[in-house]
Amino acid sequence: MAYTTFNRQINDQLKEPMFFGNPVNISRYDQQKYGIFEKLIEKQLSFFWRPEEVDVSKDRIDYQNLPEHEKHIFISNLKYQTLLDSVQGRSPNVAFLPIVSLPELETWIETWAFSETIHSRSYTHIVRNISAEPHKVFDDIMLNEKILQRAEDVTRYYDALIDGVNLYQRCGEGNHTINGESQNISLYELKRRLYLCVMSVNVLEAIRFYVSFACSFAFAERELMEGNAKIIRLIARDEALHLTGTQHMLNIMAAGDDDPQMAQIAKECEEEAYAIFRKAAEQEKDWAEFLFKDGSMIGLNKDILCQYVEYITNSRMQAIGLKPIFSTTQNPIPWINTWLVSDNVQVAPQEAEISSYLVGQIDNEVDGGDFGDFDL
Amino acid sequence: MPNVKISGNSAIAFDGTAPTLLTALEQHKLQVNFHCRQGYCGACRCKLLQGEVQYLNEPLAFVRKGEFLPCCSIPLTDIEIEIP
């Protein structure tokens, strides 16, 4: 079935599945199959922020005073996050929009990907501030073995889905010979690729980001790189929401009311889902080893970070109905939670319709006394 | 004053000094995972074994049958919960 930007077929959108039904024609939200996606859109919009609002100028001095091995930790994480958000800023649009069938989900995907582009821009904002030669940092991403290794697993599932959907929308189901190569395309196989892709995106947002987050907040616990931590805090808040979005998609798919085939696929892919989680956790542990190869930082070392990876992997797996694979049950870095609370969002009672907005994002005046009750 | 029984622990009373169940649990030094504290991340997900809770804000996070989010709820009746 070819994609069309305005599907002329008159359909009942409430009867469409999330994906692989009719392309969306009217973007209407008066009726919704899954109201949760509009709620996510509203929440995401209330989170809106711009990197320029956060002053990172003090970070420059902090960065220059960091010992070499801590510079390595900081900048490597930034590079990895840049890669992750480069992928996330475009891929949900390219992969999911051509096959989505519900207007509220279509708009959620667009809103989600847009917020990732803000993250990408914020990395440039940070790098420009700490380095006189930002190009060197970005140029290295494409040459860094450790980052490229993980990029392969981050993008593989997206690419497989996009490739299959392209072929399906051009030629339909069946055996096709394209440029002398024979390819078999079935809707069932595409749905399988879709399920695995959403699963791998879930893993990306649920686990991969958090290793970097932990390091950023560990610096900030020592009153270092605090501008960066403020930005990462905003990014972490967005990611928690995106994660909820993919968890909803996975759970709706697995329940089968939306598309009975997806429930069957979810069952069939269970082993693969476990494998995706396990591999991501292993890769992130390898990354922790690379980060701390020249030395640890105060409050965080390779072992603690690996335990955190295990802990967070378990908790993310349980959220989508999988069994935990690691024995770690306690959060080894409980202080990270304080950084992940969205207490910088305030509700204004004078507003007719209560909406959340940001406060305190531009306050750079931090007195030493403000951290009086902090313990390292 | 609803009672909150925690599997494997003694019960605590929800006496109204805490705005949410999560805060009440924390006041009694019970460790519950949390991130957003607003019901959208689902990090504090616990099992609700018995009783009923009321949400102060409808949670955005996916909540399965038999689970609830303590960060944005209060007990309506005596409840029994399990912290993962």
Image (cartoon, rainbow, N blue to C red):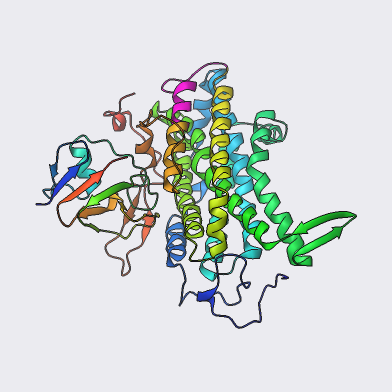
Residue A81: quadrant of the picture: top right
Q: Is residue A177 magenta?
A: no
Q: Residue at x 55, y 38 (%)?
A: A126
Which residues lie in the magenta part?
A294-309
Q: How many marks?
A: 0
Q: Is residue A376 above or below residue A261?
A: above
Question: Observer-nearest residue: A301 or A17?
Answer: A17
- The residue at 70%/51% (across/down) is A160
Residue drawn at point x = 45 percent, y = 52 percent: A244
- Give how far across and how far down residue A28 sits, in percent: 52, 76
Residue A196 place in picture, x, y as percent? 60, 50
Furthest residue toward top: A295
Toward the right, the furthest residue is A180
Q: Quadrant of residue A170?
A: bottom right
Residue A69 in view:
yes
Rendering coords of residue A7 (x, y %): 66, 77
